[in-house]
């Protein structure tokens, strides 16, 4: 294990950092999660550096000499980041002043023992592990560093479950009991911080079991207003979504390929469509306040709208017989949802597998989402109707989108004839 850390310290970026710290005569340490990941044999792309004085100077020097970009994370606390483009993507280095009188005091202030690790950048490679974090890594345990960790930063209540999800660890018994006691404190955490931790959980398989465990501690009561009895059936909905996604190949090669791409599409930051789909399935079962949940998690407009529409799909009346009109009506009501919509409806038990395939085929080959090019442009519609830019142009655009999506028109000439019939024969004034 020490070999992997020693090898890491000899990578070009770390050699540059070591030279920069030596030139500034600064004592600094590689700390935290990157060492945990190295001990576990995981890839490292985020590196934390604790500096005994001069953190900003070192960060700026490293950015200059390493070809990276410097920016502040928290200028008041002296915390900065350097992002460097490497062969495997972007590597980030976060710099912060050493807290306490020495590195052991700094590590004692961290969240969990698995992150309370350090290696001095200069000199002999020796793992500094005062809280036995390496032992807990081997045992796959999340253990708090001190009794005060959750009072010091209530977000750690949620972060503990992120490590359960992403590392496959379990929470040590006393730490789990402390989470239940301190759960109400999470109400003091910023919504965007809670969001980021929850969506790290939602990105990995097995989300349902992690949400059940969070529900048992009372955390989801504080975040979404849900009792433990509400959480269990909602977590099962997440399990069903994951099962459907695992069997997506049943939709056929084209739908499966494009469906997978859609599910991994990022809507906000690293928030994927699949993550939102799982959260929507969870919230729909609980009949939670969807808009309230979106606001609590500080979802952006696009993410909030998609989650709301996916939740809304649970309440829609579905036509017994599928045709292009009913398919258009469904997708139009739930836009901007795409191929994830029939998958969610299948997971929720609202449609059969064959209906799911039919809807996916319709979406891929017939449906035209808002914003896509039509047979006639806005300018051509205005010329056809002899009107300036006005409300009726938008109405004509929507009529044509539906007509194309349902197969009523297939050529430009048919589109012109359709709009003439629909709009030029009306008795109402245009414009």
Image: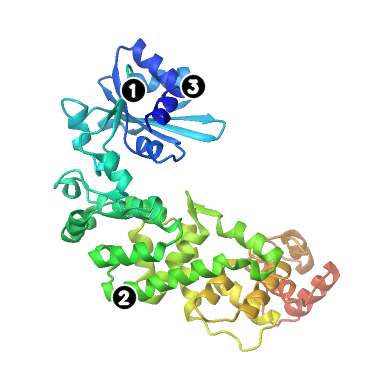
The residue pinned by badge 3 equals: 12
Q: Where's residue 257, x and y in %?
A: 66, 60
- State left or right for residue 173 relative to residue 359: left
**Quadrant in the picture for the C terminus:** bottom right
The residue pinned by badge 2 equals: 230
Instruction: Residue 125: name its quadrant.
Output: top left
Residue at x 37%, y 29% (from the top left corner): 2
- Secondary structure at badge 3 equals helix
Residue that extends furthest to the bottom in the rendered view of this protein = 320
| In the rendered image, the vertical position of residue 147 relative to residue 14, given as above or below | below
- Secondary structure at badge 1 equals loop
Q: Where's residue 239, x and y in %?
A: 45, 69
Instruction: Residue 229: name its quadrant.
Output: bottom left
Q: Is residue 431 visible?
A: no
Q: Earlier in the sequence, mark 1 or mark 3?
A: 3
Q: Earlier in the sequence, mark 1 or mark 2?
A: 1
- Secondary structure at badge 2 equals helix
Q: Where's residue 167, x and y in %?
A: 38, 50
Closest to the observer: 167 or 270?
Answer: 167
The residue pinned by badge 1 equals: 125
| In the rendered image, the vertical position of residue 127 relative to residue 413, given as above or below | above
Between marks 3 and 2 in the image, the one whose residue lies nearer the viewer: 3
Residue at x 30%, y 12% (from the top left corner): 25
């Amino acid at each position: 294990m020490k070999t992997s850390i020693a090898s890491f310290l000899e990578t070009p970026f770390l050699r540059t950092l070591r030279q920069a710290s030596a030139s500034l005569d600064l004592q600094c340490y590689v700390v935290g999660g990157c060492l945990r990941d190295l001990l576990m044999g995981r890839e490292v792309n985020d590196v934390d550096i604790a500096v005994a004085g001069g953190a900003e100077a070192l960060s700026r020097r490293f950015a200059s000499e390493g070809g990276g970009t410097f920016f502040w994370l928290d200028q008041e606390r002296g915390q900065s980041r350097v992002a460097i483009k490497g062969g495997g993507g972007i590597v980030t280095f976060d710099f912060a002043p050493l807290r306490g009188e020495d590195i052991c005091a700094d590590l004692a202030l961290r969240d969990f023992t698995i992150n309370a690790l350090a290696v001095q950048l200069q000199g002999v490679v020796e793992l500094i592990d005062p809280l036995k974090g390496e032992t807990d890594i081997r045992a796959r345990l999340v253990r708090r560093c001190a009794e005060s960790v959750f009072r010091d930063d209530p977000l750690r209540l949620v972060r503990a479950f992120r490590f359960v999800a992403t590392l496959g660890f379990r929470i040590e018994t006393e730490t789990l009991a402390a989470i239940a006691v301190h759960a109400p404190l999470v109400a003091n955490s910023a919504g965007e911080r809670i969001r980021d931790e929850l969506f790290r959980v939602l990105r990995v398989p097995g989300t349902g079991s992690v949400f059940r465990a969070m529900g048992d501690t009372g955390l989801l009561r504080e975040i979404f207003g849900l009792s433990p009895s509400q959480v269990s059936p909602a977590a099962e909905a997440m399990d069903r979504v994951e099962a459907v996604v695992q069997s997506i190949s049943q939709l056929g090669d084209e739908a499966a390929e494009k469906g997978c791409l859609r599910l991994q599409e990022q809507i906000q930051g690293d928030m994927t469509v699949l993550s939102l789909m799982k959260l929507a399935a969870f919230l729909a079962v609980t009949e939670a306040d969807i808009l309230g949940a979106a606001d609590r998690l500080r979802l952006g407009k696009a993410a909030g709208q998609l989650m709301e529409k996916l939740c809304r799909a649970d309440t829609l009346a579905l036509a017994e017989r599928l045709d292009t009109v009913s398919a258009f009506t469904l997708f139009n009501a739930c836009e901007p949802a795409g191929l994830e919509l029939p998958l969610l409806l299948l997971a929720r038990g609202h449609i059969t597998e064959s209906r799911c395939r039919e809807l996916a085929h319709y979406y891929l080959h017939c449906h035209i989402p808002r914003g896509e090019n039509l047979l006639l442009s806005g300018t051509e519609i205005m010329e056809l109707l002899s009107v300036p830019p006005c409300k009726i142009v938008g109405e004509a655009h929507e009529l044509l989108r539906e007509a194309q999506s349902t197969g009523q028109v297939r050529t430009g000439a048919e589109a012109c004839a359709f709009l003439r019939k629909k709009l030029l024969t009306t008795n109402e004034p245009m414009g």
